[in-house]
Image: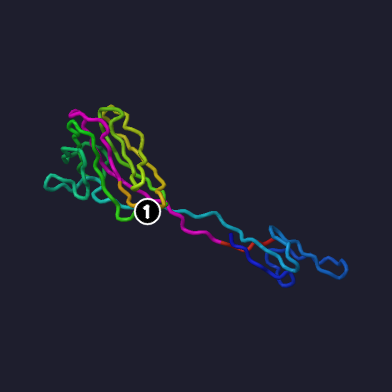
Amino acid sequence: RQEILFQQTTFHAGMSEKRVSKGGKKIYDLVYGDTRWKDKAMLPPLITAVATSSYVANLANIGFETFAAGNFTSWTKTGITSWTQETGTRTGGSGTYVARLNPSGATGNINQAMSSPFKGLTVNLKAWVKTAIASHCRIGIDDGVDVTYSSYHTGGDTWEQLTATKTLSNTASATTFRLYADTSGASKTIDLDDCTTQVTMTTGVKFFERSS
């Protein structure tokens, strides 16, 4: 904590001057100060509320609109044997297409890594997901130390927006966003659309002298 040292005889900001006649001396009222030192006063700063702001850390190909040579641009699949680009399956989507994942007997995930690990910052990941099987699909944020997951899709073959929130480790080595298929089975198809991210950061702390 920063503290500022002032001479009592010359400092007025942060102290209310009381012109009281008592032996010909002026008496001052010091607020939130420390007067353990002779003829000096320690006045702590007033810290304003810490301001925070959020900005979008853009993933590439968030709506799965770009698909070439059997792969979605900027996305990697691990343990997912098949993925396809489908049209017109979600009303209100950002584009024309969605991704359809077919685990085909294997568990796995599709993922995209950001260029910055965002050490110590809070990151949100959201994605629209549809699957007919409950407790089968969820999303997660991996910072290279551990993974924080969303809740599972509830099943029922309807679109649900899943959300994962993670404060990244100060030793984070990466920021990777993943969609997981946690149980195997050829019939457990997953549709995925509009993956978005947001990073929350502190913009600064301001110090002001206290005034009475």
Q: Amino acid at mark 1?
A: Phe
* Percent position of residue 152, x then y: 33, 32
* Percent position of residue 161, x then y: 33, 37
Tell me what residue is drawn at x 76 percent, y 66 percent.
17
In terms of depth relative to the viewer, which is nearer, 181 or 51?
A: 181
In terms of depth relative to the viewer, which is nearer, 1 or 8?
A: 1
Dominant secondary-structure state across the stretch colored magenta: strand
First to last magenta residue range: 177-206
Q: What residue sits right under mark 1 in the picture?
A: 118
Q: Is 129 left, or right, of 200 in this rendering? A: left
Q: Is residue 139 magenta?
A: no
Tell me what residue is drawn at x 23 percent, y 34 percent.
107
* Residue 18 falls in image quadrant: bottom right
In the displayed structure, would residue 11 be above or below residue 109?
below
- Residue at the farthest right position: 23
How packed mark 1 is, by other alpha carbons closer than 10 Å (few <14, some 14-19, many 20 or more), is: many
Tell me what residue is drawn at x 31 percent, y 34 percent.
160
